[in-house]
Image (cartoon, rainbow, N blue to C red):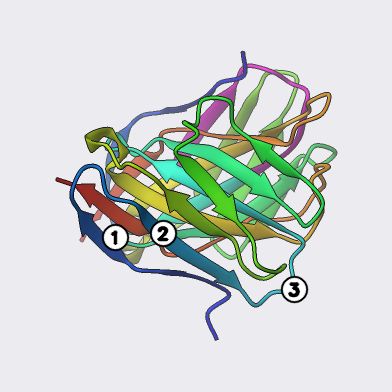
Amino acid sequence: DTAVSQTPKYLVTQMGNDKSIKCEQNLGHDTMYWYKQDSKKFLKIMFSYNNKELIINETVPNRFSPKSPDKAHLNLHINSLELGDSAVYFCASSPEGLRPGSEKLFFGSGTQLSVL
Amino acid sequence: KQEVTQIPAALSVPEGENLVLNCSFTDSAIYNLQWFRQDPGKGLTSLLLIQSSQREQTSGRLNASLDKSSGRSTLYIAASQPGDSATYLCAVRFLMNRDDKIIFGKGTRLHILP
């Protein structure tokens, strides 16, 4: 009955590979997010998305792309992985749309990506 | 530029003591502020959400306050327990013309000494 679930929990891969991280929420929320937590534990938003609009953080390389097959899923695709992509990636969701409101963020447990 | 700062980066406190964690932000134009805890190797758990119109929120032994004008929030933990050991993150949702922008502090790593 996990609210926001992401897979895999750990991902180890070689430089240059393409990989995906999956995220699903069963809360009926409208908006989903991807965050990156670096080695210094700093969390930074990468994308926020509902089925109408995608907002991209301008610092995110275009090797990263979110894909949403439906409202409950937001997967993260990463092409041509680089060493600096090693981090923990968190998926999150919130009930309201992209215009900020008062609702909470609900997070997945994270995917630790290690690029060798 | 909006920034969120949490000081101290780490804190050790004997069990049973009350403690305060601090969060400051550079822009008072915010929608809300949320406190999270993060346990090692796990995701973030929401503790308290304070809307911009509110001054404080309480949940059990936790009390979060918000002072928008001074750009500060505090998380008060009463009668601390070893299970409270975790990293506590403050996240501020800033008002923007178009984009939804949530910025996290770097967290305070709390260790409760048994």
Residue on which disc 1 sits: B41
> Is any atom of residue B17 visible in this view?
no
Residue A73 against residue B49 in the figure, above or below: below
Residue A104 against residue B54 in the figure, above or below: below
Q: Is residue B80 magenta?
A: no
In the rendered structure, the answer to whether residue A84 lies left or right of residue B93 reads left
- Mark 3 or 2, nearer chain start: 2
Whether callout 3 and callout 1 share a subunit is answered: no
Tell me which segment is drawn in magenta.
B17-33
Q: Chain of mark 1?
A: B
At label 3, which amino acid type do we have?
Gly
Classed neighbour count for the residue bearing mark 2: other residues with Cα under 10 Å, few (<14), some (14–19), many (≥20): some
Give the camera-side residue of A17 and A27. A17
Q: Chain of mark 2?
A: A
> Is any atom of residue A7 visible in this view?
yes
Residue on which disc 2 sits: A20
Q: Quadrant of the C terminus of chain A?
A: top left
At label 1, which amino acid type do we have?
Gly
In the rendered structure, the answer to whether residue A74 lies left or right of residue A87 reads right
Q: Distance of mark 3 from mark 2, alpha carbons?
A: 23 Å
